[in-house]
Amino acid sequence: LFNLYVGFEILLVASYVLITLGSTESRIRTGVVYIVVSLVSSILFLSAIAAIYGALGTVNLVQLSERMVELPQEVQLVLHLLLMLAFSIKAAVFPLSFWLPDSYPTAPAPVTAVFAGLLTKVGVYAMIRTETQLFQDSDIDVLLLVVALATMVVGILGAVAQAELKRILSFTLVSHVGYMVFGLGIGTGAALGATIYYMVHHIVVQTTLFLAVGLVERRAGSTSILKVKGLMRAAPVIAALYFLPAINLGGLPPFSGFIGKFALFDAAAAVGTPLMYVLTVGGILTSLLTLYALMRAWNLSFWRE
């Protein structure tokens, strides 16, 4: 567990340099916010490790999984929530996602693409390890499902309200972390498999979209959908590079986004509780709004004369 913390810190130290690359005023300002938030989550993670070591005398994950059942349920719950809080900040889970939409758009496009593909997914990966390996008896599935629904809906409503391509993608990134937390909250083997599949899909698609928007900025000099227009004729290759991952992220068949969402909804239907059906409806609504937000940007930036 401590080595996981060290790995996190190495990753974050490199990201501090990358997010302030170029040293413009906006990058330094948003970089400072990002660094402070990351340090707070790291302090929480370290505090959780200290509490776990104090309670169980080890930080070896295999030994922890065996000894955790010896602790009272209340103590397990406190340790569980402390770890999940730290990882939720890193994964940009609502309401701890406030830092991401401001931090990512100011960085250079290749840096933003790497961040979108890796940083939040490392947080989700740590949440999966925590849920499946350490706290099998401490159940916070209902809390995870409620948080997942809020992350999906609030994130995509933020995307719909934006007029700048990088900010639209940053909010959709937050929104689609909700699908991964949804799978984690379902907690079955099929749901966890769907979550891991969705993580891989999202890394590829979201990274491609951010790189495509970087090409739009390079060609048109802006990423505002109110200023950029006529790119379908001026840059058809960039249009294709944006359009294909955009409809994939929106969940249209036969793309990987549709397969991942269908697998999650199928796992939820197998459980069959009313909350699962509410989450499924929320997931479908989020998918439609994702398609709307990205296609509105497509119409204005590429199709408009």
Image (cartoon, rainbow, N blue to C red):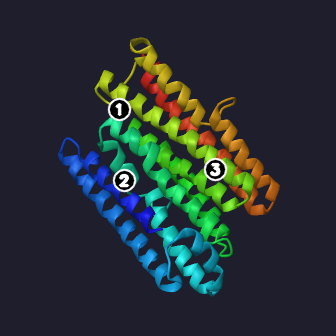
Nearer the observer, 242 or 270: 270
Q: Amino acid at mark 2?
A: Leu
Q: Amino acid at mark 3?
A: Thr
Residue matched to label 2: 11
Circles 2 and 3: CB atoms closer than 8 Å: no
Q: Which label is found at residue 223? A: 1
Q: Which amino acid lies under the numbered mark 1 shown in the image of this protein?
A: Thr
Which residue is at the front of the view, 13 or 90?
13
Residue pictured at 67% horizontal, 68% vertical = 142
The quadrant of the image that shows the C terminus is: top left
Q: Nearer the viewer, mark 2 or mark 3?
A: 2
- Report helix, strand or loop for mark 3: helix
The quarter holding residue 37 reads bottom left
x, y percentage for residue 101?
Answer: 39, 49
Please report whichever mark, 1 or 2, sits nearer to the chain's N-terminal start. 2
| Residue 52: mark in rendering | none
> At which x and y percent is residue 254?
69, 29
Point 28% across, 45% down: residue: 18
* In this rendering, position of residue 176 left or right of residue 279: left
